[in-house]
Amino acid sequence: MVRNKKDPKIMIGSSFKFGDDISTDLIAPGRFFHLRSNLPELAKHVLEDADPEFAKKVKPGDFVVGGRNFGLGSSREHAPLVIKFAGVGAVLAKSFARIFFRNSINVGLPVLICDTDKIDSGDILEIDLEKGIIINKTKNLKLKFNPLPGVMIKILNDGGLTSHIIKNKGFNL
Amino acid sequence: MYRTISEKIISEHAGRELKAGDISVVDVDVVMSQDGTGPLAVSQIKKMGFNKVKNPSKSIFFIDHAAPSPRSELSNSHIVLRKFASQTGAVVSDVGEGICHQILVESYTCPGNIVIGGDSHTCTSGALGAFATGMGSTDIAVGYVLAKTWLMVPRTIKINFNRRINKGVFAKDLIIYLIGKITSDGATYKALEFGGEVGNRLSIDDRFTISNMTVEAGAKAGIFPSDDITKEYLKSQGRLDCFKEISADKGAKYEKIIDIDCSVIEPMVCRPHTVDNTLPVSSLEKIMVNQVFIGTCTNGRFIDLKIAADILKDRKVASGVRLIVVPASKDTYLEALKEGVLETLINSGAVVLSPGCGPCVGVHQGILGDGEVCISTQNRNFKGRMGNPNSFIYLSSPATAAWSAVKGYIADPREVLG
């Protein structure tokens, strides 16, 4: 993940804008079902059916920006996993589908609910997860995002669900 | 406090009184995954340092998405699941047994249970009065080893299906109509609870179809109260002992109540590439089809195959059209075989495949070519869903699909059933 040199808690990167209803089939297509146990290969096809060039263009620390209902569809955890594997720092959307949202937290991929109408492809964003602030440097705009529920912050801070369970020998929410 | 079904079931599993919006760790009764999500769950279990599952007889690995396996990579994933299950005593439902959601309702889910599954259509089990929801592999891994998960008690939207259903209209049309009305995120984070004079009388198979598709509106669960119809079904499965009556309290607090007049609902389709892109078949332009698929956890049960066979009897599938039929489970397959349903379908030109998810997930058994159009009884029509992003999927009831197979284009089943 790319960090601001002055303040390493701040992520900085470029935006890749997608539309509404980006399904898990667009993110991790079923025709690559056989690659699910081979994450590096599967990640080469991340978001391929929404933007065939995305996997080639995305750089570590960049952001995926969606519209409404991002991640709808299947329960495949491989969807947030391939986005994370591609180096994406966070996914921003107006709203998320429930299972995708929960899976993202479990694998340690930040998912932020905000007004993405104010972000276009290529815009440079600076995100402070702790303060809950997104700065669109290109448009010189400040955006807020909704805070996560407390249990999700605990899981995210522990480094995902498996780390939470190992650390606490069970749930400690 | 007057409680919804979700509030009742989740409170009981938390050991304390909870209301919508509360978050708690809860006990789970049934945990499952399938061959697409199970291998990652197994590797997460190992990563957490566990080598046992808490409740082996209710921890199931289904091999249904790529069964029989079309590729060595998937065969190897199947080996991982079989090996882990044999080491831990967990159950494997192997090639040919059928689709996870169908086997769950046939043999595992009981009213009042919490069921978590590594598959988004786990909500199907809500038809039996259970709280059943889909999760990812890591949540399922934790569910296997601890028999626990964390849940936020969802707010509930009550859906009343009222008045009457017209001839040629089926449960699939009702749920497609509902999703068109509330959209693909109209129930995100919420539970749907079904009732109304039509809703309360729906057969168990109709309830499975409706609960199955609630996730297509974003819902966390889609629940029918358990009643005499549930009881009859469980009795027929030799599982009467697990019946209990579950219903919401009168005065339970709903986020909203949606009343649907079923008498205005016609045969419906979902058009590419989203489930909420709905239209009555009668308003559709002439759409030629290359493939018709009847099957899946949504509409692959005996009654669905029977409805299709009754339409296809003494008729032929239109020239140039492929009709693929996949029974949802081995029991479905055997019943359809015994009743002559498969023979009718095969004589009409259908190809019948082994029980499982079939071509619905885009892995095998009917991947579409570029520019091809399929009408399917499945639950999703996302771009690329059936293995090719350059193809087009329409969703419908088995009756609409079967009549379309005869006509060669998407056709209104009231022409033959009216």
Image (spheres, coloured by chain):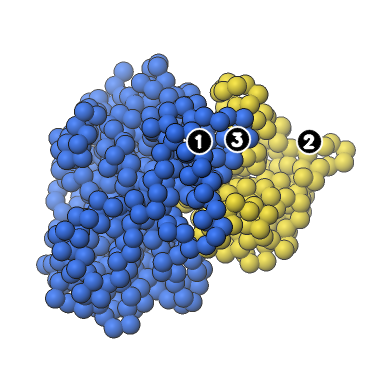
Pick the residue in front: B31 or A10.
Answer: B31
| Badge nearest the viewer, 2 or 3 | 3
Disc 2, SS: loop
Identify residue for label 1: B87
The kind of residue tagged 2 is Lys
Toward the bottom, the furthest residue is B319
| Vertical arrangement, residue B180 with respect to residue B310, above or below | above
Chain A: its colour in the image is yellow
User: Considering depth in this image, is B23 or B96 the residue closer to the camera?
Assistant: B96
**Is disc 1 in contact with disc 3, using a CB cutoff of under 8 Å?**
no
Numbered tag placed on residue A9 in the rendering = 2
Mark 1 or 2, closer to the camera: 1
- Which is more N-terminal, label 3 or label 1? 3
Q: Measuring 26% from the left and 37% from the top, which residue is drawn there?
A: B128
Task: Tell me which chain the residue with mark 3 is part of.
Answer: B
Amino acid type shown at disc 1: Gln
Q: Can residue A136 be seen in this view?
A: no
Up/down of B36 relative to B269, above or below? above
